């Protein structure tokens, strides 16, 4: 059942009419902030306009971006645009028809549960891409509106290209991508990844294996021995595999707590403005020389005394516990992580169809710092020792792709590995490697699409640093220096993590409006005891799983066209990195 606010919103949209016949009715354009326009059946009084709390461009609103209201937004789009002749309705009803159609396509794809939904997505994207500057009756000229429309048309073509690639319609995709100026694209086995890489929960994997008569064998060696014997793995061609993945390494109690603090209705997302347009990157950092990181030692054994206190003090937050456990896991694959002085973490909550562009993890989002080399004018980008991905949920979205390309590479990546989003899995990769997240392909899993909220791919990322500047709003400090950074607000890169119990009293940077999210990260003795006991069990039962090697990372959009150039522009013969815009990702 819909909430009263949602029902009012839908009733309002239905009353607005939005049909093509409304174009001839006497009426006027109403601006619905921020930036939307609707045509009314009749001219509305200002008080009546105030009732339009949402706009046709539902995906761009907080309501549609928020997983709690995605289904309401989809219903609103269908009420506004119908389900057959959306293009004409958008042209008649919206001042920005391409933007409205693109938003409708996105929300439809995010919640697609039937093949017919994907057909509707393609229809909406083609309609958005075909809108011209002269389509629709427009009020006074608005340059910002024209720019948004142009941007929406480009985005519709990009997302149509992704849809065609993921459905295996490569000839159609090549024609579109060539028209867009692209010479290279992510390879077929990457964008159209095997469906088994959509992911499951670790528990579901075990149940499925048992149902198929495949009993999981008890480990013959302990967690520490298994890891220490496999510090570096190589593929069949001798390439070092820069990514490792481990299932069952996190206690279920810990995983359940992470699901609560990063749930769709969590204050963490709201109070950071995560779903708001223009929300920049934000992360929190812990100085591991100041924090009780020895809650677990690197063999998975607990460093607690008999009275329940750790050797170096009791963890002050959930993140202290999580970082310590994840560090114990990843240091087996990347031993240098055991000597890290800082851990920086951030989280994402993404819809099934959303990906994350290929990128490098770097200090302060890639801002260059002065090199220590003799050339004082040289600037360099710093990367972490390694980065870990904790899959808080599973079965939603596409796999993580990790390549062997580094920031000084002269060619596109030749090797790549895919890690499926399995709930509870911990993946760790070399912090210098290019990586990203593929958009989920096909339909949202029926197993998760029945949830009250829109299914989300929730991940927690933790980067381990040799040293990094913790950027307190009051005091900044380099990790391991002995100085404590202070001031966690406003949001930013590598802010000191606020103490869940004392941040309101100790931190004068707390905004005047109420901030509550740190309290969800508080831990008590009962939780620490339960987690400690579970950790000892799961440390022995954890297993390493292999990342899936991609046959190729990049391929030619039109192989004959590229090979006909002199010198050849074939992806396998490139001698330098091509222009960014020539490479199609998503």
Image (tube, rainbow, N blue to C red):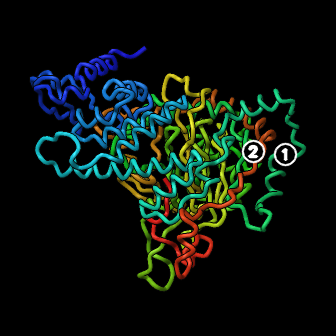
Q: Residue 459, how many percent across, how many down?
A: 56, 42
Answer yes or no: is residue 325 visible: no
**Horizontal side of residue 213 vs 529, given as left or right:** right
- In the image, 558 versus 469, the foreground residue is 558
Residue under label 1: 222
> Label 2: few (<14), some or many (≥20) within 10 Å?
many
**Mark drawn on residue 425:** none
At horizontal 14% and vertical 33% (from top left) the residue drawn is 29
Q: Secondary structure at mark 2?
A: loop
Farthest residue to the right: give it.
220
- In the image, 374 versus 190, the foreground residue is 190
Q: Residue 559, how many percent across, how many down?
A: 58, 67
**Is 72 situated above or below 428?**
above
- In the image, 528 versus 437, the foreground residue is 437
Residues at circles 2 and 1 in contact by the CB criterion of under 8 Å: yes
**Horizontal side of residue 223 vs 271, given as left or right:** right
Q: Secondary structure at mark 1?
A: loop
Q: Quadrant for residue 95, please give it.
A: top left
**Is 264 situated above or below 126?**
above
**Is 345 situated above or below 20?**
below
Q: Quadrant of the N terminus?
A: top left
**Mark drawn on residue 300:** 2
Earlier-in-chain disc, 2 versus 1: 1
- Front label number (2 vs 1): 1
């Amino acid at each position: 059942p819909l909430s009263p606010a949602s029902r009012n919103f839908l009733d309002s949209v239905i009353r607005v009419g939005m049909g093509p016949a409304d174009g001839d009715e006497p009426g006027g354009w109403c601006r619905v902030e921020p930036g939307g326009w609707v045509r009314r059946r009749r001219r509305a009084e200002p008080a009546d306009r105030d009732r339009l709390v949402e706009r046709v461009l539902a995906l761009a609103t907080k309501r549609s971006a928020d997983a709690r209201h995605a289904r309401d937004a989809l219903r609103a789009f269908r009420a506004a645009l119908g389900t057959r002749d959306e293009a004409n309705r958008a042209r008649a009803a919206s001042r920005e028809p391409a933007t409205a159609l693109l938003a409708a396509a996105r929300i439809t794809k995010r919640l697609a549960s039937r093949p017919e939904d994907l057909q509707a997505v393609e229809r909406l994207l083609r309609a958005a891409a075909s809108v011209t500057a002269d389509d629709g009756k427009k009020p006074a000229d608005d340059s910002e509106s024209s720019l948004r429309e142009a941007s929406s048309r480009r985005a519709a073509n990009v997302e149509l290209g992704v849809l065609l690639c993921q459905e295996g319609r490569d000839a159609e995709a090549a024609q579109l991508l060539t028209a867009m100026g692209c010479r290279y694209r992510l390879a077929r086995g990457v964008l159209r990844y095997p469906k088994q890489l959509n992911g499951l929960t670790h528990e579901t994997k075990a149940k499925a294996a048992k149902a198929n008569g495949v009993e999981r064998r008890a480990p013959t060696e302990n967690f520490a021995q298994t890891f220490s014997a496999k510090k570096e793995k190589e593929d069949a061609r001798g390439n070092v595999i820069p990514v490792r993945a481990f299932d069952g390494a996190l206690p279920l109690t810990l995983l359940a707590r992470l699901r609560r603090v990063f749930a769709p209705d969590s204050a963490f997302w709201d109070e950071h403005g995560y779903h708001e347009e223009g929300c920049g990157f934000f992360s929190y950092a812990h100085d591991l020389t100041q924090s009780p990181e020895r809650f677990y030692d690197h063999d998975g054994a607990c460093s607690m005394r008999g009275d329940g206190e750790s050797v170096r003090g009791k963890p002050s937050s959930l993140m202290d516990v999580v970082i310590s456990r994840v560090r114990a896991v990843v240091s087996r694959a990347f031993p240098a992580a055991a000597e890290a002085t800082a851990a920086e973490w951030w989280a994402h909550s993404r819809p099934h169809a959303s990906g994350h562009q290929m990128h490098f993890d770097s200090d302060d989002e890639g801002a260059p710092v002065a090199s220590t080399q003799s050339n004082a004018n040289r600037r360099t980008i710093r990367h972490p020792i390694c980065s870990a991905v904790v899959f808080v949920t599973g079965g939603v979205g596409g796999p993580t792709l990790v390549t062997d390309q580094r920031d000084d590479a002269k060619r596109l990546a030749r090797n790549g590995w895919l890690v499926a989003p399995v709930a509870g899995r911990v993946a760790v990769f070399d912090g210098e490697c290019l990586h990203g997240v593929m958009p989920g392909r096909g339909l949202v899993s029926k197993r998760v699409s029945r949830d009250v909220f829109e299914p989300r791919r929730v991940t927690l990322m933790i980067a381990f640093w040799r040293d990094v500047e913790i950027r307190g709003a009051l005091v900044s400090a380099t990790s391991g220096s002995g100085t404590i950074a202070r001031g966690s607000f406003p949001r930013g890169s590598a802010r000191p993590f606020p103490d869940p119990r004392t941040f309101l009293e100790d931190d004068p940077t707390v905004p005047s409006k109420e901030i509550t999210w740190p309290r969800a990260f508080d831990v008590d003795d009962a939780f620490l005891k339960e987690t400690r006991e579970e950790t000892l069990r799961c440390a022995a039962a954890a297993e390493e799983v292999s990342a899936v090697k991609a046959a190729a990372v990049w391929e030619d959009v039109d192989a004959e066209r590229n090979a006909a150039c002199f010198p050849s522009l074939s992806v396998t013969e490139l001698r330098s990195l091509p222009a960014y815009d020539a490479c199609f990702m998503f």
